[in-house]
Image: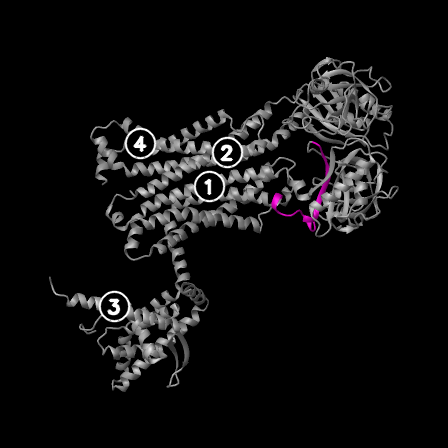
Amino acid sequence: MADDKLDIVAGTLVLMVLRTLDALGPLHGYGIARRIEQISANQLALNQGTLYPALLKLEQMGWIAAKWRPSESGRRCKFYSLTRAGKKQLQAEAANWSRASAIVDRFLSAELP
Amino acid sequence: MTRLRRLAARALSLLHVRRLDRELDDEIQTHIDLATGRYVAEGLPPDEAHLAALRDFGGVAHTKEVYRELRGASFLDTLLQDLRYAARTLRNSPAFTIVAVLTLALGIGANTAIFSVVNAVVLSPLPFRDAERLAQVRIIGHDGAEFPLSDSDFVAWRDQNRTAEAVAVTWETPVTFTQNGSAERIGSASVTDRFFDVLGARPEIGRAFEAGDDKPGGAKIAVLSHAFWQRELHGDPGVIGRTVSLEGVPHTIVGIMPAGFQFPPGSIDVWQILTMAPPARRGPFYTGGVARMKPGVSIDQLRANLASVTASLKARYPGPHDWTLDAVPLQDALVGKVKPVLYVLLGAVAFLLLIATANVANLLLGRAAAREREIALRGALGAARGRIVRQLVTESIVLAMIGGAAGLALAAFGTKALIALAPEGVPRLDEVRLNMPVFLFALGVSLVCGIVFGLAPAVGASRAPLVETLKEGSRAGTGTQHRRAQRAVVVAEIALALVLSVGAGLMIRTVAALQHVSPGFNADRLLTFELSLPQSQYPEPANVRRFYDTLLQKLTALPGVRSAGLTVSLPPDILQVTDNFTVEGQLVPPDQSAPVGPLVMVSDSLFRAFGVPLIRGRFFDERDEADAPPVVIISETLAKKYFAGLDPIGRHLKEGGPNRPAGPTNPWMTVVGVVGDVKYSGLDSAPEPAFYMPYRQNPWRGQFVVVRTASDPRMLLNGIRAAVASLDKGVPIARVKTMDDLMGASVAPSRFRATLVGIFAVVGLLLAAVGIYGVMAYAVAGRTHELGVRIALGADRATLLRLVLGEAAALVAAGIALGLSGAFVMTRMIQTLLFGVTPTDAATFAGISALLAATALAASYVPTRRALRVDPMIALRGE
């Protein structure tokens, strides 16, 4: 893996998955992975496999729901979609993230005394 | 809510782990296929595309594992893993495992054995159909004493019964069974017609008694017990319709009851019909009532019904009114007396289990200390605290289960021993089984033990601060937390052992006190047996007199026989007759009962044969012939209590109270003598106002014959049998016993309790000693370095010994103080089982405390001594 790729920050994968499903509607695992790669323009070192435990956890939390149905190609896939609770969680996490990153930004841009 | 949902999902996923695994495989396969497809579309050759897809995915197996862990399939896996780990750990420290398992097996085994008895005797329903609807009916006197019913009581009850489906009364009396010329006393119960309906019992063959069978002048019929039928009639089903000879009278056999049917409890061989005499007067009182309540009727409703019967009886008959007919559930009536004893035993054995559990907890604490580093390391490597606790608790539960299994095996033997040791008269012992409730009890006890003794050290261990523990270096197990916990456990153990031992001490003193009670006569070298002359051959008092007078002559003439006598009641436990009595000139208020005391008919020679002291006047002699003026001899207690300081000799006394006026059949009797008190109601009974009438004036057919011999009374048995047979071969000799046997049997229940609790106490004491030994050994081991330094610096070993033992002494003192206060409370609960010693007997408390202190200090002395003997150089280098 290329050295200049970013390690994924803990917790942000959840946010990315929720946002992806919010934006694109029901997707299968590979779809989600592709979308994250596309948005990050291949700058994230994401092991696509780690996505699946994350999806399971989100499902257990009740933030996303999963359903087996045929894809456009006719193959049966497990499609994930955002639930109402997931939508709320996304808003909360997005707000948190914005605040946190704003704070970090301010630290980084602050003048040395 | 989410937590609940997550739990539910985890639980559900356990059920279809396989399907979920397959779905995950599918999902990942789809992912790889789609990714491969994209790379192929981008122009890579298929195999390279596949590799690229796998690289992007990053470890399929790892993903699956993480996924499964998260999904919850790990629960079973973890359990299996923990079990395997526990088994390995236990196997790796066999000494620890063996000691812990044996300790637990003792505790759980003893508890299971006692519980199996409690379960069978007290908790299980009686072996009758709908047994909870059965009730015993009796008379309760003004002082709460229970009395049997009279015929008039039963007839009035039967006629006014509204609450019971069926009612009956029973009267137990042994009868002479004659077959092929040989006679034998067998157990018999005479019962009214609905008896078998009341108990809901069906015969194995033939028929049971039916309504109307007890009409006066009805046929003489009998129902046999299964055991008697097998023993005497070889189980021949053709006996129905044939006859058996009871008291010389043929009775037609109508039915055989199934094996296991026994009522009244005891050994009934045959049931006969009891015909109610037309109630002319109220009395005699001799039957026990039993009722099957209608469905939905409560015992209180039955009582209310009996209260109205009581009222009608009081209206009809004059006399005392300080009594009432009363009912209790049959189960309470049968086992009520042994219940408190069994619960005391269960309590005692529970103490033993607590000590055993404490000991294993102690062992585990010691081990946990030794494993502190292992556990800290696991924590450092990322094991969650809950996970460590769970693993340690799994280990202790495995330990407890092994202990429980061994305990169950022990209980199988223990229960047998218990039944063999049990004194006579404990009901339902034949129903004791190691059955499902007992098994569940053992399982439950094991589980609780495992959790209790496992949780404390486990939580303590997992909470230990990682860094410090790891830093403590090679000095294993200096965790002060563990030391404190271990000390607390040892204090508790000593306290528990003290309570148990004090209880045992009091019970042992009770036995000693009972053995020192004077029964009122000389019990050495006495042989006793019972004879009963059949009415058919001995219809008149003269016939009876002739038999017994000749027998006494023959017996006295036997070489080795000092004297012989007759009595109808046999001390210390067989009291056949009690009656009211009235002292002349003493007024009893009309609504109260006259005083009651043992009434004993005796031969002239009895008091001398027994060695009962004459206090005033004379014994019976030839003057007291059948036609002579009636005479009576009274006991010292009767003289003191009812003659109020007057000389009773020459004064008068009669049977019965105000409702039985003096007359030709109930004459005033002249007091001719006062004799010492004799115990007829058990060695622990209070002195009773007994009165004696001469056998010459009242020759009963049934007598106890008492023979005083010069040497071992058993040696004379053949001569005595021959003497009886020479008079009449058809008279069976029953209940042949030496007085030593009877006195032993009288103490047997107390001895049994004392033996059991004593065994529990000794085991408890040993376990506590092992506990303090372990703690001290461990404590001095931890201080080897310090002690070594002190010795090297010239400290006196004796001083050091005192120093270390001082710590042990502080623990022991704390335990004893705690135990003494516990014992003060607990021993009050066994007050009713004690005799001749108070529940707070100072000598017992002090003696047991000293014993415990000595044992505990000895147990701590051994390891201390060993530690101090170590060469200081070795101790120092050991660091």
Q: Quadrant of the C terminus of chain B?
A: top left
Q: Is residue B667 visible?
A: yes
Q: Residue furthest left?
A: A113
* Residue sitting at x 64%, y 30%: B745
Q: Which percent across, then down, holds residue B641?
A: 70, 20
Query: Which span of residues is magenta-colored?
Result: B121-142
Instruction: Name the chain under label 2.
Output: B
* Residue labelled with disc 4: B804
Q: Are marks 4 and 2 in contact (CB under 8 Å)?
A: no
Q: Earlier in the sequence, mark 1 or mark 4?
A: 1
Q: Quadrant of residue B559?
A: top right
Q: Are marks 1 and 3 in contact (CB under 8 Å)?
A: no
Q: Quadrant of the N terminus of chain B?
A: bottom left
Spatial CA span between label 1 and label 3: 58 Å
Q: Nearer the viewer, mark 3 or mark 2?
A: 3
Confirm whether the magenta stretch covers residue B537: no
Local packing at callout 2 (Cα closer than 10 Å; few below 14, some 14-19, many 20+) is few
Task: Give the left or right position of residue B113, taking residue B560 as reference.
Answer: left
Q: Are marks 1 and 3 on the same chain?
A: no
Q: Which percent across, then down, holds residue B446?
A: 48, 48
* Residue labelled with disc 2: B825
Task: Give the left or right position of residue B610, taking residue B251 as reference.
Answer: left
Q: Amino acid at mark 1?
A: Leu
Q: Amino acid at mark 3?
A: Arg
Q: Earlier in the sequence, mark 4 or mark 2?
A: 4
Q: Quadrant of residue B60?
A: bottom left
* Residue labelled with disc 1: B354
Spatial CA span between label 4 and label 2: 33 Å
> From the viewer's perspective, is residue B405 above or below residue B646?
below
Q: Nearer the viewer, mark 1 or mark 3?
A: 3
* Residue labelled with disc 3: A99
